[in-house]
Image (spheres, helix red, strand yellow):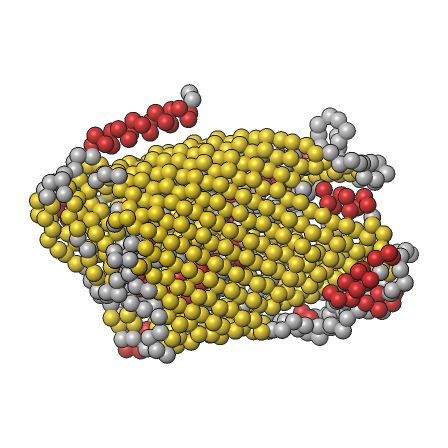
Amino acid sequence: MNTPRFSVFITLFFVMAANLLAQGHGSINGRVLDTEQFPLPGANVYIESIEKGAVTDREGKYRIANLSSGDYELSVSFIGFDTQVVSVTVDEGETTPQDFTLEGGIMLEGITVGSALHGQAKALNQQKTAPNIKNIVSADLIGRFPDPNVAEALQRIPGISVQRDQGEGRYVQIRGTDPNLSNVTINGEQIAAPEGDDRTVALDMIPSDILSSIEVTKAITPDMDGDAIGGSVNLNTMGAVSGNRVLSMTASTGYNNLVEDLSPVSGRGSLAFGNRTGDRNQFGYMISGSYNRSNRASNNNEMEYDEGELDELQLRDYELTRKRLGLVSGVDYRFSDNSVVFLRGNYNYFSDQEYRRRFTIAADELARDFKDRLEEQQVFSLSAGGEHLLSRKTSIDYMLSYSYSDQNTPSDREISYTMEDDMGDFINFDRGNPDYPQFSSMGGNPYNYSLYEFDEFGDASEITTDQHFTTRLNLKTNFELSGNTHGYLKYGGLARFKSKDRDITENIYDYGGDVTFPEILGNFEDPDFLENKYAKGVGRFPTRSTVSDLFDNHRSDFENEEEDSMEASNAEDYDATENTYAGYLMTDLKAGNFSTLFGVRYEHTKVEYTANITEFDVEGDLITPIPSTNSENTFDFFLPMVHLTYDMGQNGKLRLAWTNTFAKPRYFDLAPYRIIAHEDEELELGNPDLDAARSMNFDLMSEYYFSNVGIISGGLFYKQIKDFIYISNFEYAQAGPYLGYETTQPVNGEEADLFGFEVNLQRQLDFLPGFASGFGIYANYTYTWSEADLTTDGGTQRTVSLPGQAENVANFALSYEKGGFSSRISLNYAGAFVDEIRETSDSDRYYDERFQLDVSASQKLTSNIRLFAEVMNLTNAPLRYYNGVTSRPEQQEFYSWWGNFGVKLNF
């Protein structure tokens, strides 16, 4: 059967059927606002007598269509606000307008819905009225935690943990799945990924204070992109959604306790301005921006093992300067309440200037190297579209978008010097304390810098670009099957065209001049490196200026190592195109307290790659010229989905979902590159024939929403994942020149099962007397278990946990809100998980558990001015990897604590 033609036929059939069924006579529409004329999205507007209603959108608008003429009692409810009931008369063939202005129903001493709880009330209402399982967090709640970037903010949501870089959250893991198994969008549209290997976006580059809310969808619907095995993260930027002017500013300064050489002081500022103008408030605009500059540092020791025995120790000292810029703008024009066009743009920039001092200790060699690297990332997105009501029963929305990203490393210089002993081992290791193994010398003094000789100098640059062009169209038709059974049919599709490429340029040099190692050393020393676990720490190193002076002023003394440079510049380059076409059909039916959403999505993707073959002969010499190779692959996905919801009274929900999702392989895993070393009989391969991972998902969730802006929920989830991808090490078995070579290649695993449950509580303890009524609790816990089957070297079958699956993830925050004062103590815990699967479980690489304590507080001085302070990582939680068992650490990186103090202005 021709699947695309069949899908088109089914779509047309349901479109005609829906139009025949949609025989309503009149309708009611309007907006739901608060007393300050801000919209209330997610409000439930309902006619109880016929069990029919609607939910307000982001702008607070609603529409109830296909009503017989007559009189109706129309009620509107919203968490944290008083319910309103009005009488409305509907005339045949007419649209009756009815707006609502709701007043806050909660008024504790010093706590009002219109302040700290207002934004989260909107988020919880949207979550409550959604047809599927999701978590929504408002900008107000994000601002109550000391989270400067999106990844940090996401770690507070149930079922989410983050992977970190230099102490900051970077990659998001949803329900125990690898970051590459989840989807990230801004305002509903995928954004280009700047990194060369991965599809996921590093979320430390996006500041959290340019957002209006964050949505984490854990059970997707057919109108969403299907590549979301873990889930989908959508970042909603600020927009002009009311008739009031919005003006807010934030300014702060910070301090990092570990920075030694750079200034420990940082700065951060943000600004947002928006308004609606015109005689009907038809034109709206919003501009917001955020800038952050911080100096960071870390102390690190890393260990390598050979069959369980310590083989090498590295001591590393990092200092970094990070800059983060986010800009968001949007304009829209409303022709009427039912017709709007918009233009949205956002730009995010992130730079990381890193200085690394590394002291490497091996049995027969000591090495000192200094790295000076600037890495820049930027993501730009622009989208234009509109939403229109075509008739009383049918609406259309459309969007054309462009997204561009790049990762640019304009400068990456590294110089190294070594001390060797040709007579044998001259370093002993003592693992009495396995976390901080000690070393002693039987030969030269490791801190006698005159004994070090030049080893290598590298001067590199890299640029990776990614571009997306996307067009999408959706239509929605309301219909009624009987008096209390009604719903809508939604159908549409998209086309997305991607192009991605990576170009590395690296020159590696030998040096024949007279300048010695001591002559280029700087004065930097870290007297408290790893809290004095090593007596002399990392010692002394060159500086940025001494390395630049040596290379730039003595260029004739450096000789380019052509073969090494050519290998480094070509082995990981690739070009790729990826074109996706998708269509879907879904319907939402509601009858009494039951509602169901079901449908299907079809996606077809074609990828084309060009990569290089880097080959060395039996003497170890590079074979030139380096040839390129091409590959093609296609993926087809047929994704049926069903969502069932039962309303347990006004504030309770019971949800059940069956969905099917996928995750395409990482970009570089699909590239047909080959790195062949005949001398060592080693082979590294890409895999253009990889299958996408596919998952069948079951979710069960129960929710109860408190009237004073809170929730208690609990649920189970199960994922059956086929063809998951991992890096395999094996002997090449195919006949030919590589037979028996030790090979590394990404391959598909067999089948994996992932099971878990999560519980969540947000509650203001207003039932407590007096002072204690200001306390609130924000707590969640997620447990996951997984089992995956794969084949390792020699054909051995292994059962492992899925990479990235942490068994336990938890958050707990105790807050206090009263009299304009707000404070929060926040605990975040993420358990250990397998980070890299190796030949045996004894050698697998694990990401260790992590526990972080943060504290934040603020005080409102006037209705427009608030002072705040926040301190992060009071537990000095490290980034820690270990080899098989916790007593065999591979990496430990400590960051100490850092904090911010500032002021927020709202007008």
Q: Tell me: residue 183, above or below residue 204.
A: above
Residue 849 seen in this snapshot: no
Q: Which residue is at 78% across, 59% downward? A: 415
- The reply to whether residue 558 is in sight is yes
Residue 639 x/y as whole percent: 41, 34
142 relative to 766 in the view: left or right: right
> Position of 726 compared to 272: left or right?
right
437 relative position to 53: left or right: right
Residue that sits furthest to the front in the current view: 279
Name of the residue lying farthest toward the left: 70
Quarter where residue 168 is shown: bottom right
Q: Quadrant of the N terminus?
A: top left
Task: Locate residue 289, reporting x and y percent.
Answer: 46, 62
* The C terminus: image quadrant: bottom left
Residue nearest the viewer, comparing 359 with 808: 359
* Image point (61%, 35%), residue name: 609
Q: Residue placed at 59% from the left, 46% from the top?
A: 465
Q: Position of residue 65 (x, y in %)?
A: 19, 42
Q: Is residue 488 left or right of residue 759?
A: left
Rendered residue at 24%/70% (across/down): 107
